[in-house]
Image (cartoon, helix red, strand yellow):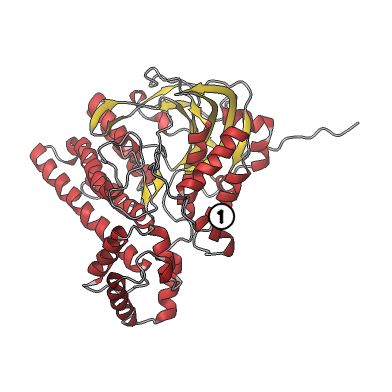
Amino acid sequence: MAEEKVTPEAGWNFDNSYARLPESLYSVVNPTPVHSPKLVAANGPLADALGLNIQALRSQQGIAVLAGNNIPEGAMPIAEAYAGHQFGNFTKLGDGRAVLLGEQITPSGERYDIQLKGSGRTPYSRGGDGRAALGPMLREFIISEALHALGIPTTRSLAVITTGEPVIRDTELPGAVLTRVAASHLRVGTFQYAAGWGTSEELQTLADYTLQRHYPEASTEGNRYLTLLQEVIKRQAELIAKWQLVGFIHGVMNTDNMALSGESIDFGPCAFMDTYDPGTVFSSIDLQGRYAYGNQPQIAAWNLARFAETLLPLLHSDREEAVKLAEAEIYQFRELFHGHWLSGMIAKLGISNEELGDEALIQELLDMMKKYRADYTNTFRALTFGQQEDTPMYGTEDFAGWYEKWQARLGRQPEGGTSSYELMRSSNPAVIPRNHRVEEALHAAVTQGDYSVMERLLGVLASPYSHSADQLEYTTLPEPTSRPYRTFCGT
């Protein structure tokens, strides 16, 4: 008789601290089971970091959990309530198609939300079906893993499950559930909800929880809620600068899509810029360019101002004094962002010792890139490897003058040329998830059930700064087209 194989334990180790907050902030709800779940993407390295057994997750029992068909021991499924300014318009929202299973405590003691996205209707669905299509879930898997490899704080994707059930959007599409891993799902919109529909005690409890969960090392002497505002602003300033440095365009920077942990979250119409242009917009619904690449820092400041407004009752008993405190901190965002952006940009040019004229040198290059429609990523890559002839600016009087100034600037580096080269290699990625490559992978997966294209893409994106030979084909630009590239929210 053949010995029966025993599936190893998955390693789930749940706590449910968010569910111990006031009940007005969430609803207890189970995922809706699906017909015939199948695992199509799994993140082994992330599973290891979480203390999970990837082989167990690939088993039928593991897939049942990732699909929402079974609830693992210790989990307490909830849907979180939040509000948000969507394209400037305020509304009550919530997890309309996502369920938080609980918080996985890793072997090192870290805490991460485990959320099933596309897992069915919740009390916040507002008429939606609570489901997700396969393409957008795979897009989130690709983009979030690419950001992680680029060194940018982000939520991550543990797995994607196909449901065996269609979802109806403009057409019939295969359904899917994505398992999202996040430091938390606390958002600016969470505080907007608490401030608008909760009590002052509930708002204070939420603020205390956020401090304890994300900023335990921050000094809480004096005004602890001012400290919370300051810390959130610091992380967002650094995050948005990192987006700008690699040409990432989030696409839908609503206040419900700004995580207080400082992670990138919610990857609907996101994409990476090819041709440099601050006005670049990919989202099909952003008709006015509110969330264009060049507007992202200003929108972040606007969102943070909305966060500060929710904290006013906690900042000071006198509203005028509270407003003064909040305004002073929001003003600091621009300076903090600019500092991170400038230090990152000079590093992309191999400069480590900042001088007064560096920003002008950077701006001159960016202006040229826009004028000659140069690719953002490939331009810095060409400069890194002395391949200036590969840029459309090469041979122009503009570029010759700029190049001479840049070389003179590098000559004033105390470390010498080798150090500048290494700095540029580590600051300028060889590859990004090019839009046409992402679409190629999604098309193969969704229409043909072929996930090998996506797997190859993920393999290349995993080491963006290695500048290896196998990455070269992924640095090429798409064929010229008269139709602009458009992305969609995928809801």
Q: Does 430 sit above or below residue 85?
A: below
Of 101 and 68, nearer the camera is: 68
Of 348 and 474, nearer the camera is: 474
Where is residue 36? Give x, y as percent: 64, 24
Q: Does 477 sit above or below residue 483?
A: below
Question: Quick check: 409 left or right of 46?
Answer: left
Which residue is denoted by mark 1 in the rendering?
A: 460
- Secondary structure found at label 1: helix
Q: What is the quadrant of residue 83 in the picture?
A: top left
The residue positioned 32% from the left and 44% from the top of the image is 281
**So how many labels did they put on this image?**
1
Give amino acid for label 1: Val
The quadrant of the rendering that contains the C terminus is top left
Of 377 and 59, nearer the camera is: 377
Mark 1 crowd level (few <14, some 14–19, many ≥20, 10 Å Cα): many
Where is residue 145? Give x, y as percent: 50, 48
Where is residue 311? Give x, y as percent: 21, 38
Residue 481 visible: yes
Question: Quick check: 448 left or right of 405?
Answer: right
Where is residue 461? Give x, y as percent: 52, 53
The residue positioned 46% from the left and 71% from the top of the image is 385
